[in-house]
């Protein structure tokens, strides 16, 4: 791309799933639209990242170090998977899988304490269903109360409090004092309720994985949009808007003139861009009020699945909590590939003693696995890790938390366009926000907003192909109260960030239709 001035109709900023989905949708609706995607990094995919590692069958196989789990209730993700003929596999047979932790090892008093606490949270959650958060007295109250305060006031036993603290660190990479009660409740709700945090089962967002890795989604999207429209290593630093149009400027001094912009990047990176005229202080403050969370994901490949030896059935879909001396710090699970190559994968979160040097960190992770599975785990083929808190232009993910007092504004404000700028990104999604599905849905929604301004005539009838979403998008809820399980598995596959306006499973397709109607018909 010229470092001089270029021109197009729409600039999409960010080549993660949301930005690429937005560009794909625009391109699909009108092939004549001139679209430019500007990506800061030298790769596409954002918070999805598939790596090739040495596998037992002598080849290199694929493992995901970012977004990984998918499920039938995620309509937009399913839509793209079908569109691109990408196959999924379900690594866990129904009712298999080992419990992550055993509440029976706790005293009766602690167990009762945790159970009553879970009930209380559920009842709070019910009070928020279908309310406008900004107008709700309950929401206001929950937003001004830190989760830590609520925990201290509603748990009696020290052990239960310690468990909840650890669970919080595992789930969010944050201390309970760093998030509001409202944010916590919305997060759980966005993942479909407490039950989603249980081990992988059918009809959740974590029932299957994508054969060959998630990265394929982004590659297919780029293929459809056209490789020549996607520019890597172009961090956007300035956006100037005027009556005639907008000018997007990157740190390499590339300039693009356009009519509309879709910002498909994480909130705190939105705040880092310079705007002229400036972003409204309230909106800027909102973007800045999303702190970083710490997460390291790892994958280890093996010649043999030694963890399956003693009892195949119970180790199939194996998951367990990784403990250090102070309690749970992460999880590990059976990540054998779609081709049957054995592997373990997992997360470490919010662990003070974890060295930032990758070599030392690898040793620590392997020590934690050894504590659980014995010395056999050291006979590895290949080890790979990704510290998402160090990843430029993503920051600490997979999820982001909102500081107390800001959650109630997150609803519509985040999505509200700023003149010619439209906002995508999983955090702005109304369906499975925080997940890959949310990223895709937000991209489609932002694209329809742009079309409304640039090509109003072609959006008068809904795009049937996109609206034809799977009928089987349903969840079969099961309710259990296992805090540790809930917390630890939550790290693995539930990265919902913000429950915005709708419930997100059964009604996914309806919500999508409603969104499009909102854009098209204003109702
Ligand atoms: C470890 C981990 C595990 C996860 N597990 C799951 C899972 O199992 N299931 C699931 O559904 N989801 C999971 N997720 C979440 C899922 O990956 C994300 O929700 C989704 O990928 C977010 O997509 P996005 O497009 O909204 O944002 P991103 O992927 O963050 O894309 C934003 C892009 O914008 C670029 N960018 C930022 N700033 C600029 C700038 N100034 N100029 C230009 N470009 C810029 C970034 O480089 C990035 O490529 C996981 C995430 C992580 C990290």
Image (tube, helix red, strand yellow):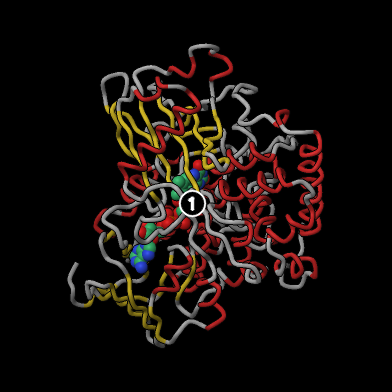
Residue 216, given in percent of the width and then of the height, sits at: 36, 41
Above or below residue 495? Residue 289 is below
Above or below residue 91? Residue 274 is below
Q: Quadrant of residue 390?
A: bottom left
Secondary-structure class at tag 1: loop
**Residue drawn 25% across and 61% down?**
233
Q: Looking at the image, how many numbered discs can be counted on the residues? A: 1
Query: Within 10 Å of the Cα at label 1, are there few (<14), some (14-19), or many (20+) other Cα atoms?
Result: many
Q: Quadrant of residue 519?
A: bottom right
Name the foreground residue: 162 vs 212: 162
Whether the residue under disc 1 has CB within 8 Å of ligand 1: yes
Above or below residue 165? Residue 38 is below
**Residue drawn 40% across and 38% down?**
364
Position of 502 compared to 391: left or right? Answer: right
Residue 242, given in percent of the width and then of the height, sits at: 39, 87
Tell me which image quadrant ligand 1 sits in: bottom left
Name the foreground residue: 409 vs 294: 294
Tell me if I can see residue 412 in this picture: yes
Residue 201, given in percent of the width and then of the height, sits at: 62, 31
Q: Quadrant of the C terminus?
A: bottom right
Position of 46 compared to 283: left or right? Answer: left
Residue 517, given in percent of the width and then of the height, sits at: 63, 62
Instruction: Give the residue at mark 1.
Output: 398
Q: Quadrant of the N terminus?
A: bottom left
**Residue drawn 79% across and 49% down?**
156
**Residue drawn 52% across and 35% down?**
322
Tell me if I can see residue 14 in this picture: no
Q: Quadrant of residue 137?
A: bottom right
Name the foreground residue: 519 vs 66: 66
């Amino acid at each position: 791309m010229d470092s001089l001035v270029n021109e197009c109709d729409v600039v999409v900023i960010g080549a993660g799933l949301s930005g690429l989905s937005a560009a794909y949708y625009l391109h699909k609706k009108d092939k004549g639209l001139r679209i430019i995607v500007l990506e800061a990094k030298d790769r596409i995919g954002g918070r999805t990242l598939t790596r090739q590692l040495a596998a037992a069958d002598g080849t290199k196989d694929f493992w995901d170090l970012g977004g990984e789990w998918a499920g039938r209730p995620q309509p937009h993700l399913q839509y793209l998977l079908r569109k691109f003929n990408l196959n999924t596999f379900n690594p866990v047979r129904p009712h298999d899988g080992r419990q992550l932790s055993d509440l029976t090892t706790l005293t009766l008093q602690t167990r009762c304490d945790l159970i009553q606490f879970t009930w209380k949270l559920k009842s709070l959650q019910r009070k928020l269903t279908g309310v406008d958060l900004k107008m709700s007295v309950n929401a206001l109250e929950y937003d001004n109360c830190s989760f830590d305060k609520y925990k201290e006031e509603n748990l009696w036993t020290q052990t239960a409090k310690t468990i909840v603290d650890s669970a919080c660190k595992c789930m969010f990479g944050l201390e309970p004092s760093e998030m509001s009660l409202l944010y916590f409740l919305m997060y759980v709700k966005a993942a479909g309720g407490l039950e989603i945090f249980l081990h992988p089962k059918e009809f959740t967002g974590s029932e299957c994985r994508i054969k060959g890795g998630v990265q394929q989604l982004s590659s297919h999207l780029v293929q459809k949009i056209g490789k020549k429209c996607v520019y890597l290593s172009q961090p956007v630093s300035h956006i100037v808007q005027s009556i005639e149009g907008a000018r997007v400027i990157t740190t390499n001094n590339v300039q693009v003139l356009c009519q509309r912009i879709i910002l498909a990047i994480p909130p705190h990176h939105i705040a880092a861009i310079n705007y002229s005229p400036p972003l409204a202080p309230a909106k800027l403050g909102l973007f800045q009020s999303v702190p970083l969370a710490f997460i390291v994901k790892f994958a280890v490949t093996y010649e043999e699945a030694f963890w399956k030896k003693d009892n195949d059935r119970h180790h199939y879909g194996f998951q367990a909590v990784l403990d250090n001396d102070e309690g749970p710090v992460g999880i590990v699970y059976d990540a054998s590939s779609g081709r049957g190559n054995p592997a373990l994968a997992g997360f470490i979160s919010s662990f003070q003693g974890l060295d930032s040097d990758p070599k030392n960190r690898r040793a620590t992770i392997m020590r934690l696995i050894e504590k659980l599975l014995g010395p056999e785990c050291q006979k590895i083929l290949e080890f790979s890790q990704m510290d998402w808190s160090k990843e430029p232009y993503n920051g600490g993910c997979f999820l982001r938390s909102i500081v107390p007092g800001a959650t109630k504004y997150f609803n519509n404000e985040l999505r509200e366009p700023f003149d010619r700028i439209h906002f995508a990104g999983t955090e702005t999604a109304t369906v499975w926000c925080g997940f890959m599905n949310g990223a895709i849905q937000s991209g489609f929604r932002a694209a329809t907003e742009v079309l409304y301004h640039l090509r109003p005539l072609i959006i008068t009838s809904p795009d049937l192909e996109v609206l034809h979403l799977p009928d089987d998008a349903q969840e079969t809820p099961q309710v259990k109260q296992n805090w540790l399980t809930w917390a630890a598995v939550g790290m693995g596959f539930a990265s919902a960030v913000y429950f915005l306006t709708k419930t997100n499973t059964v009604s996914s397709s309806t919500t999508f239709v409603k969104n499009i109607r909102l854009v098209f018909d204003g109702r």
